[in-house]
Amino acid sequence: MSQSYVDTIGRWGQGNIDLNNRIVVHNPNGSISTELSFTVGIDNEVVLLPSIVNGVILSDEAAIQHYLDTGEYLGKFTTDAAADAYAEALHLRQEWFYTERVRDLLQYNEIMGIQVTNNGVTTTLPDPSSWTYQVGDLDTSGGRDATGYLHRAYVASKINYEFEWHGLEWEKLAQILAAINSPKFTLKAPDPRTFQDTYTGQYYVGDRTGKNHYYIPEKPNIALFDLKLKFIEY
């Protein structure tokens, strides 16, 4: 399915739900679901409602009550045919977004393989949402002479990384913080000089900066966090 088709669906979708930020339901056969929907007549309108809310499959009665409580819906139409057409297009759109897109991202991040080894325990970090790097050279001494020529005493090149994660579940956040809870550890990450090899070095982490940005009142044990870490090489 073409990207233009996906963008088109996103523009003419008449609902007020963020289609790109849905908690998925993992089915017994290994597939995932994000959009089960049905239509109901309310106030002379055909309203398309989600049957999956916050990763939970609801009965029709519970889904209707959720709509009445929150006002969240997938679309409002004047005819059943228009609602059915949009529901089918939305299903295809979500199938693409949460299967092809996720599969491609997982294949890419599988190559990254960011790992921390701390006190003999190796932890593979969750895939970061974004990352930056800095390659710098270290000199013991140097300077320019009277002719302007630069004298360098090159020692080594160091690579520093900054990783950001968005929407981490609490367990993943705790896993990362536990893995780096040491003044010194080994980091294995992509080598930015080739993007084909990995680089391994001794690192420490600066300030741990994060925030909680998503909370479900019905499930107080569920929260999503953002986290930013800078890995500095010894």
Image: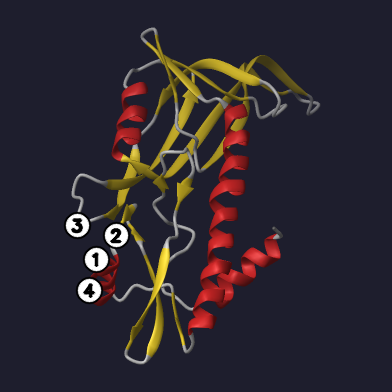
Label 4, label 2: how far apart the Cα atoms are: 14 Å
In the rendering, which numbered label is found on residue 62?
1
The three-letter amino acid code for the residue at tag 1 is Ala
Q: Which residue is mark 4?
A: 69
Label 3, label 4: how far apart the Cα atoms are: 13 Å
Residue 114 in the image: above or below residue 67: above
Q: Which residue is mark 2?
A: 58
Between tags 1 and 4, which lies in front? Answer: 1
Q: Nearer the viewer, residue 125 or 70?
A: 70
Q: Position of residue 201 (x, y in %)?
A: 54, 15
Q: Quadrant of residue 178?
A: top left
192 on left or right of 22: right
Q: Quadrant of residue 73?
A: bottom left
CB of mark 2 within 8 Å of CB of mark 1?
Answer: yes
Neighbourhood count class around disc 1 (C-alpha, 10 Å): few under 14, some 14–19, many 20 upward: few
The three-letter amino acid code for the residue at tag 2 is Leu
Q: Nearer the viewer, residue 99 or 152?
A: 99
Q: Secondary structure at mark 2?
A: loop
Neighbourhood count class around disc 3 (C-alpha, 10 Å): few under 14, some 14–19, many 20 upward: few
Residue at image point 68% right, 60% down = 3
225 on left or right of 201: left
Q: Secondary structure at mark 1?
A: helix
69 on left or right of 13: left
Precedes in sequence: disc 3 or disc 4: 4
Q: Which residue is mark 3?
A: 217
